[in-house]
Image (cartoon, rainbow, N blue to C red):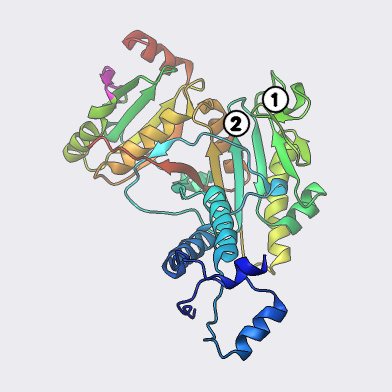
């Protein structure tokens, strides 16, 4: 061993500095654009419809009330403020579930806790129509109290492509009844324009 | 990051190293970057995999406030009904001033924008009333709103309930 050490090896020296530089840049880029999916705040998977709206309105960063419409016809009510959720749903990561079609049961109830074919880990509060309307109002009031009236929720509708329009119609009727007359539909950017 | 000297990587142990330094050998500060690169590569892979780059956009919709004072009388001649059947077929029919409406006309999706613009050109007071079948897919609704938004017109549309009478009109026109 001693002998081997003393002999100078003809080593191929690769300078890694440029490589490290480039990788560092890439790393910084991805760290900055990354948005994480945390299990406790996991969103319900829906296939958003695509649109080519010419104005480039983006989703607001915070204070969003998300209504997710699944293929099975369930409406999930969620907000991005966990304090407000704790007040209204009794759990910082809770969501409200409303099934507008009174003739059938929601997917969550019939499958024993599945949403979109997958088990759903967040606490779900099942609401009927009156409770749902109350929750819409309560959530907004809770946020206003929390922030001393500075902020208000923007309602966004995340509907699955396959959802029946009837559910949207029901929701619009509820929005009207609860004086939430402004809302937005979330869509994906259409990649291939017809023009 | 300081580059190294010219000599090959030194793998000597503590004692030997000191001996070498004493001998007056050239001192090169050599930092082995391989572990760092490994870690950074791992981090990079992690961030690439967890990043979702598509930013969804939104489509703003304003519903009428629903107060009685908001109700306005509309001349039926300014109205364009867009009825969409369960299967997503689009029917246009224009209202007539005497309160009735013209026969429905099937519109293919690609012609829709041009057609709306043409109607708007003939009547700038155009008001679009959307009647969607409850069993229609939500996707069609977004598509149709998208077409209306893209058309170069003043956006005045409102949603109406599809009554049985409307369904009848649609069925008569081809379902």
Q: Which structural element holds mark 1? A: helix
| Left or right for A129, reference B97 | right
Q: Earlier in the sequence, mark 2 or mark 1?
A: 2
Above or below for B11 versus B44: below
On the image, which quarter does residue B115 sit in? top left
What predominant SS class does the magenta segment belong to? loop
Can marks 2 and 1 be said to lie on one chain? yes
Q: Position of residue B43 (x, y in %)?
A: 58, 58
Q: What residue is at 70 percent from the left and 25 percent from the top?
A: A107
Image mark 1: chain: A
Element at label 2: loop
> Residue at (78%, 39%) from the top-left corner?
A125
Q: Report whether residue A150 is seen.
A: no
For label 1, the residue is A107
Residue A173 in the image: x percent, y percent? 57, 36
Residue assigned mark 2: A70
Magenta residues, start to end: B100-108
Q: Is residue A178 magenta?
A: no
Q: Residues within 10 Å of mark 2 (few under 14, many from 20)?
A: many
Q: Nearer the viewer, residue A107 or A167?
A: A107
Residue nearest the viewer, comparing A13 with A108: A13
Q: State the residue lying farthest toward the right.
A: A90
Tag 2 subunit: A
Q: Are marks 2 and 1 in contact (CB under 8 Å)?
A: yes
**What residue sits 55% from the left and 46% below the top?**
A156
């Amino acid at each position: 061993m001693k002998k081997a050490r003393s002999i100078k090896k003809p080593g191929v020296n690769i300078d890694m500095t440029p490589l490290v530089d480039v990788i560092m840049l890439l790393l910084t880029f991805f760290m900055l654009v990354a948005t994480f999916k945390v299990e406790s705040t996991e969103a319900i998977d829906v296939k958003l419809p695509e649109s080519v709206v010419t104005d480039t309105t983006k989703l607001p960063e915070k204070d969003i009330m998300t209504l997710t419409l699944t293929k099975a016809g369930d409406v999930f009510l969620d907000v991005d403020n966990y304090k407000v959720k704790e007040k209204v749903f009794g759990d910082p990561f809770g969501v409200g579930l409303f099934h507008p079609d009174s003739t059938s049961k929601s997917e969550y109830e019939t499958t024993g806790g599945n949403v979109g074919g997958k088990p759903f880990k967040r606490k779900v509060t099942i609401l009927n129509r009156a409770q749902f309307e109350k929750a819409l109002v309560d959530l907004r009031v809770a946020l206003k109290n929390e922030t001393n009236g500075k902020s208000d929720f923007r309602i966004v509708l995340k509907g699955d492509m396959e959802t029946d329009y009837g559910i949207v119609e029901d929701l619009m009727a509820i929005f009207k009844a609860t004086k939430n007359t402004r809302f937005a539909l979330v869509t994906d950017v259409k990649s291939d324009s017809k023009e | 990051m300081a580059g190294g000297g010219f000599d090959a990587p030194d793998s000597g142990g503590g004692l030997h190293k000191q001996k070498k330094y004493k001998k007056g050998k050239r001192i090169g500060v050599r930092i082995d970057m391989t572990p760092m690169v490994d870690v950074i590569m791992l981090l990079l892979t992690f961030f690439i995999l967890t990043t979702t780059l598509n930013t969804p956009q939104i489509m703003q919709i304003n519903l009428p406030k629903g107060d009685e004072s908001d109700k306005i009388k509309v001349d039926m001649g300014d109205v364009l009904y867009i009825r969409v059947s369960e299967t997503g077929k689009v029917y246009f029919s224009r209202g007539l001033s005497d309160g009735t409406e013209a026969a429905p006309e099937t519109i293919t999706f690609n012609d829709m924008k041009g057609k709306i613009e043409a109607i708007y050109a003939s009547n700038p007071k155009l008001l679009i009333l959307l009647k969607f079948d409850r069993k229609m897919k939500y996707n069609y609704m977004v598509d149709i709103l998208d077409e209306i938004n893209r058309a170069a017109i003043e956006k005045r549309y409102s949603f109406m309930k599809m009554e049985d009478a409307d369904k009848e009109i649609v069925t008569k026109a081809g379902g």
